[in-house]
Image (cartoon, rainbow, N blue to C red):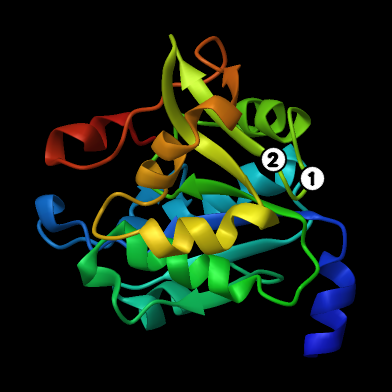
Amino acid sequence: MTDREARDEDEDQVVGLLLAAGGGRRLGGRPKALLTHRGRPLVEHAVGVLRAAGCARVHVVLGAAADTVRERARLAGCVIVTNPAWESGMGASLRAGLGSLAGTGARAAVVCLVDQPGIGPEAVARVLAAGGDASSLVSAVYDGVRGHPVLLGADHWAGVARTATGDRGARAYLREHAQAITLVECGDVARPFDIDTPEDLAHLE
């Protein structure tokens, strides 16, 4: 796909942005993208969730074992972004992902994490329905507590990128702009657990 075709395809769209670079340090160094869920790599499941929710285009940020993920996971049609600084934390992956959207014409990005298989298309679709223009800030909440997915309008990307350091992701920016965020309760359709420890692997199917 040429750059021009990518721009045309993304124009006036909300793009799915999947952060899937983690190395699974507390999982003994097992890259999270390659954990098995429902018979396939977890990154495939997460891409499917975004597409089922209505994202025609998905950008996937890889880091740990990126070449192996490309070989094993079916990611056809996705824009693959490699984050060489993945070990520095989620902030670097978010910056890389937002950087990959520059010039595409996308008006917003809905950000999901690869290690949250309990969040399905219903929750993502709710967040998408609550916003989508360039000025939007939308966050899922679970019993009133903010979580993922988060929708970031294009007007906010530069500010998010400036404050995304370590493992904080967009947290600092969202805290500063809390009054502008549309909150969408998703606790009735999703479970926001993370796959971080060996005990958490019990959540995978």
- Taking depth in this image into account, of 60 and 95 the one nearest to the observer is 95
Looking at numbered disc 1 in the image, what kind of residue is underneath it?
Answer: Asp
* Residue under pointer 2: 136
Q: Is residue 41 visible?
A: no
Marks 2 and 1, how far apart in space?
5 Å
Q: What is the quadrant of the C terminus in the image? A: top left
Position of 148 with respect to 121 (left or right) is left
- Identify whether 182 is placed above or below 45: above
- Identify whether 76 is placed above or below 180: below
- Taking depth in this image into account, of 27 and 106 the one nearest to the observer is 106
Task: Tell me, yes or no, whether the two marked residues, 2 and 1, touch with CB atoms within 8 Å.
Answer: yes
- Residue at disc 1, secondary structure: loop
Q: Quadrant of residue 67?
A: bottom left
Circle on res. 201? none
Residue at image position (33%, 53%) is: 35
Q: Residues within 10 Å of mark 1 (few under 14, many from 20)?
A: some
Residue at image position (40%, 27%) is: 192
Q: What percent of the width, then of the height, locates residue 98?
A: 55, 66
Q: What is the quadrant of the N terminus in the image? A: bottom right
- Residue at disc 2, secondary structure: loop
Looking at numbered disc 2 in the image, what kind of residue is underneath it?
Answer: Ser
Q: Residues within 10 Å of mark 2 (few under 14, many from 20)?
A: many
* Residue under pointer 1: 133
- Taking depth in this image into account, of 34 and 116 the one nearest to the observer is 116
Q: What percent of the width, then of the height, locates residue 174?
A: 45, 39
Position of 14 with respect to 78 (left or right) is right
